[in-house]
Image (spheres, coloured by chain):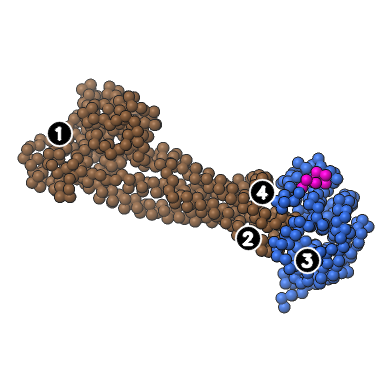
Amino acid sequence: MIKTHSLVRRFDGFTIISYDDYVFEDGKSYVMLGASGCGKSTFLNMLAGVLSPSEGNVEIDGVNMTALSQHQRDSFRAANVGYIFQDFRLLEDMSVQDNIDILKLEGVDVSRSGALLKELGILSKRGRRVAQLSGGEKQRVAIARALVKQPSFILADEPTGNLNYAIGRKVTEELLKAARGKTLICVTHDDRLSELFDVVIDMNELAHAEECDTNA
Amino acid sequence: MLKFALKHMFTKRARMALVALSVIISATVGLLAYNVSSQINDGIQASAVYYDIIIGPAGSSTQLAMNTMFFTDKPLGTISYDYVDELMATGLVNRAVPMTMGDSYNASRVVGTAAELLEDKALKEGRLFETDELYAAVVGSKVASQYSLEPGDTMITSHGLSSAGTQHAASPYTVVGILETTHTNYDNTVFTSYKTVWAVHGHEEEHGEHEEAEETETPAQTAQERADVMSHTARGTTAQTHAEEDEDEEGHAHEGEVCAILVKTKSPAAYSRITDAYSGNSSLLVINPATVLREVLSQVDTSTQIVYALCAVILVMNILVISVITLLNLIDSKKEITLMRTIGISMKHVGEVYLVQNALLGLVSTLVALVLSHASLALINTYTVGMGIVTDPYRIYPFEWLIALTVFVISVLPTMISIGAMARRDVIESR
């Protein structure tokens, strides 16, 4: 279970984003809807531990993640969090398989990769360079990489943002299928996909972004 | 880890090749500049002056020293061989070694001398020639390797100091020995008895070659004159300089003539007496080779200091160039590092990947630079050896290892520092 408490993030001393408290239960899929700039990605980054909150904390299974060192948060993320991005975050010059095999550096067992790639319909592309793939294929590779380590939590930041609606919907369906039984938190501005998730959260109402001089 | 690091490197082969190339070029230039300047300086110093007096025809003392110590430059002319006997008769000298020059074998000098000149030199093969043994030659190691000479082989020398001169085809030499490599001009020189040089020129003249009139004057030494040496009086000489002769004929020693005499006196007192006795003769030049070489070295020292200063500038520039290039490479890689971290690769492992890559790149580039600088040295040597500058491509100075280590460290250090700094920041902020 993930709980957030009074999260606030300041940027450059001028922008403040404050968030209401959330609770994400195990095994459920959540979609967080919100307009661009409302702080969706920032929220996800704080959940993943790649960005520290300026105030408040993130608690995962009873552990205050904010109190951990960067190294401890990296280790936790490596073992428990699968992260999917709008811009895929793939090593473009390496092959599909290499992009999954990189997790071996953290001792992740990637033996499921074949089955996952097959499930996502890109098994035949495993030897291809990522740069040669289409946007939909790239996102499937990113999903396979996020799921191969069988994480407890899957975070998806606008996973369909670079895809057209039809492909985006298909990819989302595949993601939900592959992530069955895991906690999935997906942020998007496309409310047409919200029907696919267990819980819909409207961040436009719950996150508050304001611009002011926080150094003053 | 290594497999992934290599695969990752391979995907960036063009950039890696450019980084490696810049490191290699910078390090090679630095290493080469240091090695060349050091070897030239060492080479001059290595020609340790065993002989304390050199006597030759009047002229330039530097020319006489360079001519007899390094076998470079043209001989000043000739003096009578009788001086050798005269010097030995004084009882003040341990050794008086005549030296004649003027012929060549391809691009290598032929030095006619006494076997004593080579007594302290190690032989790779064969033996030394006897002073009375005609047409026997001992060749330097480079001459032997360059022309595939072995003991028993014959060689035909040419008149003059270039291979374009008339060949002494009727008077071939037989190789009797090959010197060990000394990395001095001995390596590029052919040694024979001075009597052989006399015989070759006597033979050629008998057969009508070199018909031009030689102004050879035989010293009319008298017993009284020889005694003058002992009584510290200046004496006359019939030494004839050939400065105005045809260039090819300059310094050619015919029977009874030598170009110079290397003298090792028995004591400081003997040194003074011999010097005093001969320096009063205006036709002769009497030098202390150590003094002349010191003067040469002081001039070379200035040049060396300039070269060292240039080396230092080059090395500092290399350090800057390599640091900037590796840092730029790392900045380019920051996006990827952030990517790896966001998907859960710990900074420790990300750091290891980049460290392995940069260490490999630095190590290979440094080793290639070392090999290249010495290969360049070998190439340079083929050109400079004819000018009397012999360098050893296999010689590695301890300072070169230090340069190589510095290059390696600065290939890796910026990465370490930068990754260390990134590890302390949030993944998103470290972009």
Colour of chain A in the image: blue
Answer yes or no: are tags 1 and 2 on the same subunit.
Answer: yes
Residue type pointed to by label 3: Val
Q: Is residue A114 magenta?
A: yes
Q: Residue at x 52, y 55 (%)?
A: B319
Residue B1's label in the rendered image is: 4
Residue A180 screen position, x and y as percent: 88, 53
Which residue is denoted by mark 3 in the rendering? A63
Q: Residue at x 73, y 47 (%)?
A: A101
Answer yes or no: are tags 4 and 1 on the same subunit.
Answer: yes
Relative to B303, is B203 above or below? above
User: Which chain is mark 3 on?
Assistant: A
Residue range (magenta)? A110-117
Residue A77 screen position, x and y as percent: 76, 58
User: Which chain is mark 1 on?
Assistant: B
Q: Badge 3: how crowded within 10 Å, few (<14), some, or many (20+)?
A: few
Determine the CA span between mark 2 and mark 3.
Answer: 26 Å
Residue type pointed to by label 1: Glu
Which residue is denoted by mark 2 in the rendering? B420
Residue A81 screen position, x and y as percent: 79, 57
| Secondary-structure class at tag 1 | loop
